[in-house]
Amino acid sequence: MGFLDRIVSQGMKDVPNAWHPLTSKEQLDTIVEESKAQPVAIFKHSTRCGISHNIKYNLEENWDFEDQDLKFYYLDLLAYRSISNLIAQRFGVVHQSPQVIVFKDGVPTFSTSHHGISVKRLHGAL
């Protein structure tokens, strides 16, 4: 692995504590149920994509949500691509990377990708 690959592929070790790893298909049922009580978001991140890395960095630098305001799940696309595929199939949200999908009342209500992802846009989606 080259120097740049090591920088870009940080994986879960640098994800803020407020971000919950999405690692199983069963968690999608949990997300649907949780979104009935509070908004829930999924951040789909490619650990080998420079744009995705920059978007993730910008989210981390500007993060100002409390867990009770927005529950935030982190999906490592390289490790769990099948979960991303299931999200697209089950909820009708076309796969993109990076991507944020916000769920409220059991359904996706907002989706954006690439440079459309920001803390400000997430606040607007709530």
Image: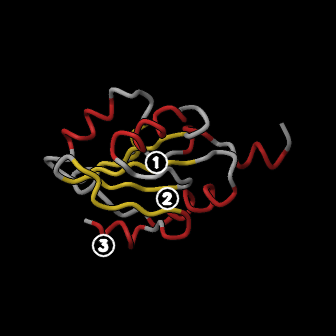
Q: What amino acid type should be assigned to the residue bearing mark 1?
A: Pro
Upstream in sequence: badge 2 or badge 1: 1
Estimate how packed mark 3 is, as few (under 14), some (14 to 19) or many (20 or more) residues with alpha carbons within 10 Å: few
Q: Are the two marked residues, 2 and 1, in contact with CB atoms closer than 8 angstroms?
A: yes
Give the position of the C terminus as an image quadrant: bottom left
**What residue does disc 3 label?**
124
Q: What amino acid type should be assigned to the residue bearing mark 2?
A: Glu
| Mark 3 and mark 1: Cα distance apart in space | 21 Å
Q: Position of residue 62 (x, y in %)?
A: 46, 67
Upstream in sequence: badge 3 or badge 1: 1
**What residue does disc 1 label?**
16
Q: Residue at 48%, 41% (x, y): give it.
A: 75
Estimate how packed mark 1 is, as few (under 14), some (14 to 19) or many (20 or more) residues with alpha carbons within 10 Å: few
- Circle 3 sits in a helix, a strand or a loop, which is it? helix
Q: Position of residue 125 (x, y in %)?
A: 29, 67
Nearest the viewer among 123 and 46 is: 46
Q: Residue at 13%, 47% (x, y): give it.
A: 37
- Circle 2 sits in a helix, a strand or a loop, which is it? helix
**What residue does disc 2 label?**
60
* Colour mode of the rendering: secondary structure
Q: What amino acid type should be assigned to the residue bearing mark 3?
A: Gly
Q: Give the tally of numbered discs.
A: 3
Give the left or right position of residue 11, taking residue 72 as reference: right
Upstream in sequence: badge 3 or badge 2: 2
Q: Residue at 35%, 66% (x, y): give it.
A: 122
- Circle 1 sits in a helix, a strand or a loop, which is it? loop
Give the left or right position of residue 125, taking residue 120 as reference: left
Give the position of the N terminus as an image quadrant: top right
